Image: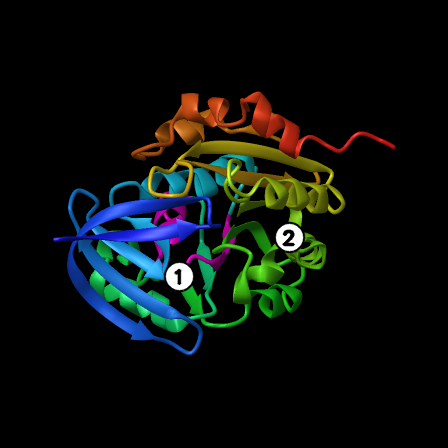
Amino acid sequence: MDWYYEPYKEITAVGIRIEGLVHAERSAYQEIKVYDTVGHGRLLTLDGMVMLTELDEFVYHDLITHLPLCIHADPRRVLVIGGGDGGSVREILKHPSVEQVVLCELDERVTRVCQRYIPSVAGHLEDPRVALNFADGVEFVRAHEAAFDVIVVDSSEPEGPAAGLFRRAFFADLRRALRPGGVIAAQTESPFYSAATVRDVYNELRSVFREVHPCFGPVPTYPGGTWTWALASDTRTPAMLDRARAAALRCRYFNLDIAAGAFALPNFIRELVDPAPAR
């Protein structure tokens, strides 16, 4: 047995004990690897970065999907940008009102690898309500005006192909791609080790959307063990959460208490995401 280590920003490292390499390939975009681990189930890495483990991926996917879907008045058509592992799609399909989930993933090989080797996460991508598009998310959003009720930006770190998913121009395109009353949700990085990125992303979001609400939760195999997500809309707020809809969901992490508590921020995160004081 050996250990998989992901050094992060030359500050810290995530270590996971592995039993062996299950699959490795280099796609047109990145290196994709799947490992068997001790205590974490299957592990997916892209270019050496931990994307998910079966042990804790449900926390990330519950928070990025169920909060916006329960805040929207009647979500029917949902877009997932990135999220090629299929975890966000799996959770979105738990909502009976959803008629279609469009997955827009740049790298088809990520999806195909996860379908074969991590079906606990990607096993719902063949649902008839799911449409797979292997394309650039920035270009896809720009070409679909007023098309979606909820958009989930399930991206990797703001590096390489994912860098454009953290910029104001992309957020403005997301706003145009929403139907009236629409909501977006996006992962917004580690509050411990990516403080500058977190601060910048919320400033950019607030320059586009009237309502921007951060939340946070635990993801043990991500650097720092704590992660942040943003919900943004012009009209919908966390106070509009449909409690009956949230209570009816069968999730491993998300419930009514989590729906309320996710937006209760510790002071150090609040300082990062609150609007900058006027000068």
Residue drawn at the location 46% of the way across and 27% of the way down:
259
The numbered mark at residue 265 is: none
Residue 127 in the magenta stretch? The answer is no
Which residue is farthest front? 10
Which residue is farthest right? 279
The residue wearing badge 2 is 178
Q: Could you give the CA–CA distance between mark 1 and mark 2, rounded to whole angstroms?
A: 21 Å
Q: Nearer the viewer, residue 169 or 177?
A: 169
Q: Which residues are magenta?
A: 76-96
Q: Is residue 143 visible?
A: yes
| Secondary structure category for the residue under label 2 | strand
Residue 229, position in %: x, y? Answer: 52, 40
The mark tally for this picture is 2
Q: Amino acid at mark 1?
A: Gly
The numbered mark at residue 84 is: 1
Tell whether label 2 touches label 1 (CB within 8 Å).
no
Residue 211, position in %: x, y? Answer: 69, 36
Residue drawn at the location 58% of the way across and 26% of the way down:
268
Q: Nearer the viewer, residue 173 or 200?
A: 200
